[in-house]
Amino acid sequence: MLVPMKELLAWAEQKNCAVGAFSVGNMEMVLGAVAAAEETGTPIILQIAEKRLAASPLHLMAPMMVSAAKRASVPIAVHLDHGLTLGCIREAIDYGFTSVMLDCSLLPLEENIEKTREVVSVASQCGVTVEAELGVVGGNEGDTAEHKILCTDPAAAKRFCEETGVDALAVAIGNAHGNYPVLPELRFDVLEEIYHTVDTPLVLHGGTGISDDQFRRAISLGVRKINIATASFDALAAAAKTYSDGAGKPDYFKLSPLCADAVRRNVVRHINVFLNRQ
Ligand code: 13P
């Protein structure tokens, strides 16, 4: 069933776990992620970033994601990840997304606050949850350009949450999008300070390549939503390569379920860590 993202954040808070937010870019990824949620009996978030819409158009992805969530046997929120423009955010809300992120993290604090307040005002009229980001997460969703990691300042985070009224805050603690060259050193000291300063549920981006122990520690310090994108895209691409490297005539009807299943396995693995299941 389709639910507001806020409900899943409250569920995660109550269970002292994190809800997995899994990026999707096609039907196989949607099928795989939803199958994982149903198999584990666990709520998830299906998400897509604005920059990914060039490859996976919103007018096709949105109805599929919303419909999959509505038909699922577990609660699922549908989220616009890294929304960059108010136009795209409004469009996602019109398609029935139950959550949106505005990413103005590269702008000065004042401007980030001003633009985020505008989105909160639009979204709250429709019962839509809002996530924003403060500090700079490394890498760049949907882009090859790298930018420097800048840790979230706990005092600025407190002011930001109070003045915008956001429902979830993405933090920068040394995390980055994409594959890490080596295991990242996350600044748990910064996360702990944010956790003690801010009441808003925290979000960890750049989940691919973060260790299970790091996930558990982040959850113990208030992280309630964890984003996973690259690991699912890589799992699907690897399954497609293994299939096409194999002997025999290529057959879409064999390839498609293999791709969905690769995503399902990746999502199940992460769900179990985020639930603190062994
Ligand atoms: P990864 O691609 O590193 O898993 O990051 C996902 C993410 O944070 C999407 O916003």
Image (cartoon, rainbow, N blue to C red):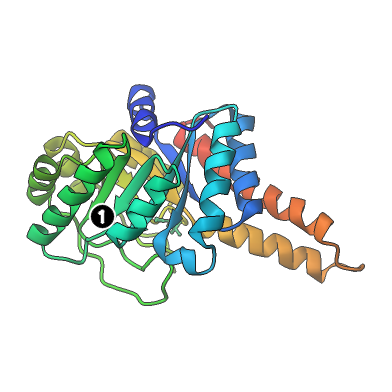
User: Residue most toward the front?
Assistant: 94
- For the point 61% across and 52% down, which residue is it? 29
Q: Taking the image as four quarters, which one is ligand 1 found in?
A: bottom left
Q: Position of residue 267 (x, y in %)?
A: 57, 44
In the image, is the residue at mark 1 within 8 Å of ligand 1 by its beta carbon? no
Q: Position of residue 160 (x, y in %)?
A: 12, 48
Q: Decide which of 29, 274 is in the foreground and name it.
A: 29
User: Residue most toward the bottom?
Assistant: 145
Q: Does residue 234 show up?
A: yes
Residue type indicated by callout 1 = Ile
The residue under label 1 is 173
Label 1: element kind = loop
- For the point 51% across and 57% down, which residue is it? 59
Q: Quadrant of the C terminus?
A: top right
Q: Residues within 10 Å of mark 1 (few under 14, many from 20)?
A: many
The quadrant holding residue 142 is bottom left
Up-down: is 40 above or below 63?
A: above
- For the point 25% across and 66% down, which residue is it? 149
Q: Does residue 205 show up?
A: no
